[in-house]
Amino acid sequence: MLDDDRTPETDAAGHDAHESRHRDDDVVARVLGHAEGRRSATVFSGDQAGGRAQALQADDAAATGTTDDGAQFAREERAGLRRVDGLSTELEDVTEVEYRQLRLERAVLIGVYRAGTLEDAENSLHELAALAETAGAEVLDGVLQRRPNPDPATYLGRGKVAELADIVASLGADTVVADTELAPSQRRALEDAVKVKVIDRTAVILDIFSQHAKSREGKAQVELAQLEYLLPRLRGWGQSMSRQAGGQVGSSGAGMGSRGPGETKIELDRRRIHTRMAKLRRQIAGMKSARDTKRQERERNAVPSVAIAGYTNAGKSSLLNRITKAGVLVENQLFATLDATVRRTETEDGRPYTIADTVGFVRNLPHQLVEAFRSTLEEVQNADVLVHVVDASHPDPAAQLSTVRDVIADVDGRDIPEIVAFNKSDLVGPERELELRALVPDAVFVSARTGARVEELLERIAGTLPTPEVELDLVVPYSRGDLVSYLHDRGAVLSSEHIADGTRLRARVHPDQLGLFDGLIEHPELVPGFEATRPGVRRRPAGTPRD
Ligand SMILES: Nc1nc2c(ncn2[C@@H]2O[C@H](COP(=O)(O)OP(=O)(O)OP(=O)(O)O)[C@@H](O)[C@H]2O)c(=O)[nH]1
Ligand SMILES: [Mg+2]
């Protein structure tokens, strides 16, 4: 197996690596701490926590020591690692410094790119920096290596790993973040070499999601994704542990007394994780049906829906706030929004519709999260119109567009009418606008911040919305035969019967026609859009039928 690449001599004491292993423990503890904080996780609570600690300690013993201490590596090829500009941060005030000292990790980012993809890799690394900062880290540096493929053992090539160890040591970093999803064995091999905690893009995104999830459903989805991520990594610990159980007594204090439970304990943990995951899946399914009911209600009321989709930080929530004054959280952070917010609003001419804010997308969104957020993305899947928000000031809007369209296609949203809105137009000049127009000719340019051209977007939405029919019951007096024939001509009569007071009809009409039937509708309060046609609120002259 992947994890058995350590040779016995590497198990000799090496306290630095041991240290890093403890910090690694912190990450796992933090991931699970969120779950524990919710008092909902049974996986590692109570004596389980002890079990996990033992597992990690046993792993410590297995992992302590490395083939080299880093300084032994040759320093050739130093120029081969490419620094990415603009990734250093300046601490601004004391509170920030204190905060960071308390909690922030000091990270160096690493990535691998093939020939010809440097720019893309740099953008991706900048994005990883934003992700790491959102997760609460300070990014000290970022380096890229050109390689046809990542090294299967250590991600970066061997020589580069040595350079990385130097960089990490000289900057005083305590974390390395790889712009990929590392195999468990790669992560460990890297840790052994650089002697600080190594995490990957997936772990960072999962960490942000777990910090930001607010609703019960969102929390459950994130926890599920985290456990899925953890499971194969747990197996890694189990393997080194059971191997460790056979010998190495006294090699390092950490391993002592913690080797007993071995594979059995891991099996137990794994079973408990599976149980917990099954429970979460059931819970999520339950919450989904509650949401389905709500949506069906909206659909039955024939209120069409708009979903705002787009890359993370594109300004989706800002736009929703601008349109509906919803007061949705807006942050210059990635994944500020994890829960779908649905608001009701209406077109200029009084047609109601719902508009939903959704979770942002990002390149290489961990597949565990795509799966977990599939139900949240149903807002997208079931929308009548998609407003696809793209940050016009982003260095690579084309990549954002295609990432988001891929996810939309993934949730079967390909056939939904899409309005592309380039947001943050206040930040870009006319040249950029021309470029973007070439990319999407019929896009709208808006600024959620200044409100510029938001009206135009609203018009586009109004024009794209399906015009819903409203179903209603009404009794038309025999003196108004004209209305009955009007209904037959312009609406749809579902049933009719003659009663003492007149003709009782169940009919379907366009909301704009409702004004004609003022006073004749049974339970008008149940008819959506009826309010808009009442005197005083009415937007069209009374009784003007639409042609
Ligand atoms: N200059 C400018 N900044 C904007 C505009 N719209 C949004 N922003 C900023 O962009 C950042 C992200 O905005 P959000 O509305 O939170 O973006 P989002 O797409 O909802 O992001 P997530 O929920 O994290 O996926 C915030 O700092 C906003 O203030 C705009 O039109 N112009
Ligand atoms: Mg948002």
Image: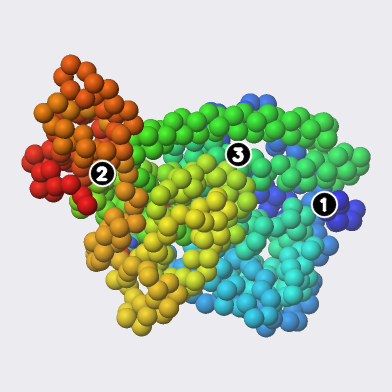
What is the distance, in whole Å, between disc 3 and disc 1 at their CAs?
A: 24 Å
Residue of label 1: 3
Residue at image position (55%, 51%) is 412
Q: Can you tell which of label 3 and label 1 is closer to the viewer?
A: 3
Tags 3 and 2 touching, CB below 8 Å: no
Q: Examine the rendered structure and indicate whether residue 16 appears above or below residue 527.
A: below
Q: Nearer the viewer, residue 249 or 231?
A: 231
Name which of mark 3 and mark 1 comes first in the sequence. 1
Q: Can you tell which of label 1 and label 2 is closer to the viewer?
A: 2
Q: Residues within 10 Å of mark 2 (few under 14, many from 20)?
A: some
Q: Amino acid at mark 3?
A: Leu
Tags 3 and 1 touching, CB below 8 Å: no
Q: Nearer the viewer, residue 294 or 238?
A: 294
Label 2 CB, ligand 1: below 8 Å?
no
Name which of mark 3 and mark 2 comes first in the sequence. 3
Secondary structure category for the residue under label 2: helix
Which numbered dot is residue 490?
2
Residue 114 shown left or right of residue 441 in the figure = right
Q: Examine the rendered structure and indicate whether residue 10 appears above or below residue 222.
A: below
Name which of mark 1 and mark 2 comes first in the sequence. 1
Quarter of the rendering containing residue 528: top left
What is the distance, in whole Å, between disc 1 and disc 2 at their CAs?
A: 72 Å
Residue at image position (56%, 68%) is 124
Secondary structure category for the residue under label 1: helix
Q: Amino acid at mark 2?
A: Arg
Taking the image as drawn, is residue 134 in sight? no
Residue 388 shown left or right of residue 157 in the figure = left
Q: Amino acid at mark 1?
A: Asp
Residue 357 in picture, x, y percent from top left? 39, 49
Residue of label 3: 224
Tags 1 and 2 touching, CB below 8 Å: no
Residue 113 in picture, x, y percent from top left? 66, 74
